[in-house]
Amino acid sequence: MFIEQGIHSDNKFWKYLFGSVLIFGASLIGQLPLLMGVLYETLVNKKTYPNSNAAIMHFLEPNWTLFLLLFSFVFVFLGIYFVVRNLHHQTLLSIITSRTRIDWKRVFFSFWVWAGFTIASTAVFYFLNPEDFVVQFQLVPFLILFGIGLVLFPFQIGCEELLFRGYLMQGFGNLAHNKWFPLLMTSLIFGLLHLANPEVDKMGYSILIYYIGTGLFLGILTLMDDGMELALGFHFANNFIGALLVTSDWSAFQTYAVLKDISNPSNSLEVLLPVFIIFPTLVVLFAKRYQWENWTEKLTGKIS
């Protein structure tokens, strides 16, 4: 059982709080290269210092910004590894899956399901509403974007899954000795940590429904499947394919994507459709493929 792998008498909850502080410290160290790049532009090239996260996204060349942002997660990954191994005396595998090894077939299946849906839905939206998009494809910057994303997005999405669906899921399991509390808490924290995203400024706090709903969806996949392989595949497809296909002035990642969305986003389309229609459909798909059973016990049951 996945969540039970972190349940030990010496795994007190204070260790998870302290470990989270150490991981946060690692993330701060990882952000220093981006800070130095911004300071160089302001001090040497006399550019005005950006006063918001959205301004930072537009401050440097897009591929350079993306590289520095994603590179910071290498330090986060090292922080997670150090905490899990030295503070909790667990293997990294124990916060990834209950299997003896990572099931890469699950990762790739989930990736291709969501990548295929993302590509198809983007094509449909483009052909139905071409006035909402600008084609901005440039071969060389796009290839650089592809390379950066292929190498570094695994660190970004991997760290988020390791932290929320792995480390903190088991941590809150140690605290509450049930499964519904870790599922809800990790989903809530995951959503609230996206408050700094520029999408919130554009769409308002209602988009938190999407972020929290996404965390809940990924948490359900992890608990029902006894591992985060499906969550990893989905998350990588969502961020990597999304960065390649579409960008906008108000999105978290400014990239040399094929298309630029110049429309005004719709809460019903961007928030409600995924959370209440698409994600539940995916849960049903995965449940049938992997023959999930004992839903109540796996999602809300007690942990001894």
Image (cartoon, rainbow, N blue to C red):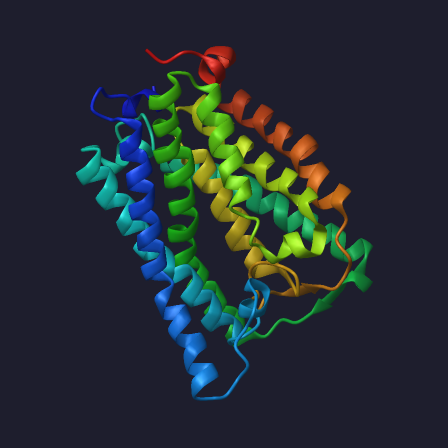
Tell which residue pokes out farthest to the bottom in this image: 45
Residue situated in front as seen by the camera: 54 or 270: 54
Screen quadrant of the N terminus = top left
Whether residue 103 appears in this view of the structure is no
Whether residue 121 appears in this view of the structure is yes
Q: Residue at x 62, y 65 (%)?
A: 258
Residue situated in front as seen by the camera: 211 or 13: 13
Q: Quadrant of residue 59?
A: bottom right
Residue 271 horizontal side relative to residue 157, left or right: right
Residue situated in front as seen by the camera: 69 or 194: 194
Q: Quadrant of residue 43?
A: bottom left
In the rendering, at what x and y percent does residue 268 appear? 77, 41
**In the rendered image, the vertical position of residue 258 relative to residue 276, given as above or below:** below
In the rendering, at what x and y percent does residue 285 appear? 58, 27
Residue 173 horizontal side relative to residue 297, left or right: left
In the rendering, at what x and y percent does residue 298 appear? 45, 16
**In the rendered image, the vertical position of residue 234 relative to residue 95, given as above or below:** below
Q: Residue at x 35, y 67 (%)?
A: 32
**In the rendered image, the vertical position of residue 291 relative to residue 132, given as above or below:** above
**In the rendered image, the vertical position of residue 243 relative to residue 80, given as above or below:** below
